[in-house]
Image (tube, rainbow, N blue to C red):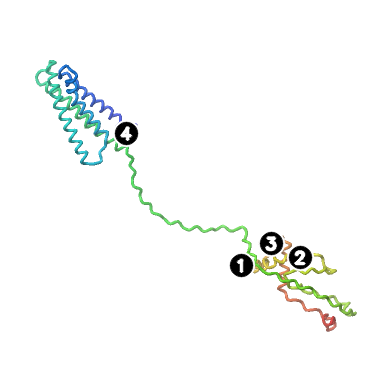
């Protein structure tokens, strides 16, 4: 059982005690009055007024000190009137019904004293219960705010972001010049023609394949700038040459195309080979 529930039960017991004391005073006043309803009502009013006053004080809280003082003064006046009237009425009734000596003057004090004690107890319990029913929230203590350290992302990205493709204007393909037929000589037939470097151009020239070469799918021209950029970026970042697989991952292309792109870039960076000489004379001079 909680404290609040116990106090409420005690308050009901005190209220019943006060009602019993007021009922005894009202009965004595009615017995002392003339046998008519008007006289009996007038005689019963002072104790009833005191009971109602005590109930109002115990139930209605007052937030202003001056109003609380005024209410207590009015309650004390009503209690004094009720005590004076009830005392002499009860003394007369007890004397009429056989009490002698000091008994008729002492019995009314027991009733009035019970009413006073019950009234004070009822007001005190009401204030106690009101205090427990009011939720009291303690002021929140100031909690020091500790700065949280900045979190560093230590996760390694699974794939490198694809480099931006530089916008380049494709060069116009220059038409291939017709080859001048060379004069065949016996010395020229015995020699093997030297390998010439591929022309340095970004566009693909549609020319029939030579007899000794296979038909290979041309590399898209727009991949050469992107491959060159990826190669330079990787070389600057890691200090190592990029592999075909890494280039394929960066450009999202096939491994074979990446390998051909690397070969093309290597060829572009290699200076062209000098034509072979036959008997002290280059092939170009022989053709002239």
Q: Nearer the viewer, mark 2 or mark 3?
A: 2
Q: Position of residue 6 (x, y in %)?
A: 31, 31
Residue 244 image-quadrant placement: bottom right
Which numbered circle lies on residue 248?
3
Helix, strand or loop at mark 4: helix
Q: Earlier in the sequence, mark 3 or mark 1?
A: 1
The CA distance from mark 4 to mark 2 is: 94 Å
Which quarter of the image is occupied by the C terminus?
A: bottom right
Q: CA distance from mark 4 to mark 3?
A: 80 Å
Q: Are marks 2 and 1 in contact (CB under 8 Å)?
A: no
Up-down: is 133 above or below 106? below
Disc number for residue 4: 4
Q: Exactly how many numbered labels are in the figure?
A: 4
Q: Nearer the viewer, residue 45 or 92?
A: 45
- Label placed on residue 218: 2
N-terminal of the pair, mark 4 or mark 1, is 4
- In the figure, is residue 98 to the left or right of 224? left
- According to the image, label 1 marks what residue? 237
Residue 153 is marked as none
Q: CA distance from mark 2 to mark 3?
A: 17 Å
């Amino acid at each position: 059982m909680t404290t609040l529930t116990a106090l409420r039960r005690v308050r009901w017991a005190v209220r019943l005690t006060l009602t019993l004391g007021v009922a005894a005073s009202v009965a004595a006043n009615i017995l002392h009055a003339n046998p008519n309803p008007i006289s009996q009502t007038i005689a019963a009013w002072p104790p009833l007024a005191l009971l109602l006053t005590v109930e109002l004080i115990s139930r209605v809280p007052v937030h202003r000190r001056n109003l609380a003082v005024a209410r207590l003064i009015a309650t004390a006046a009503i209690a004094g009137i009720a005590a004076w009237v009830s005392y002499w009425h009860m003394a007369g009734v007890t004397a009429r019904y056989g009490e002698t000596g000091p008994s008729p003057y002492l019995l009314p004090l027991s009733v009035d004293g019970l009413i006073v004690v019950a009234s004070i107890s009822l007001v005190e319990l009401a204030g106690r219960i009101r205090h427990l029913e009011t939720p009291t929230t303690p002021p929140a203590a100031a909690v020091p705010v500790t700065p949280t350290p900045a979190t560093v992302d230590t996760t390694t990205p699974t794939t490198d972001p694809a480099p931006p493709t530089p916008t380049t204007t494709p060069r116009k393909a220059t038409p291939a010049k017709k080859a001048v037929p060379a004069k065949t000589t016996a010395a020229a037939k015995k020699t093997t023609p030297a390998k010439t470097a591929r022309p340095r151009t970004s566009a693909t020239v549609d020319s029939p394949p030579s007899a000794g070469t296979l038909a290979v799918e041309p590399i898209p021209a727009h991949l050469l700038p992107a491959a060159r950029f990826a190669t330079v970026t990787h070389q600057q970042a890691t200090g190592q040459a990029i592999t075909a697989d890494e280039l394929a991952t960066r450009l999202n292309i096939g491994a074979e195309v990446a390998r051909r792109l690397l070969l093309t870039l290597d060829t572009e960076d290699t200076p062209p080979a000098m034509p072979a000489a036959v008997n002290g004379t280059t092939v170009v001079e022989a053709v002239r």
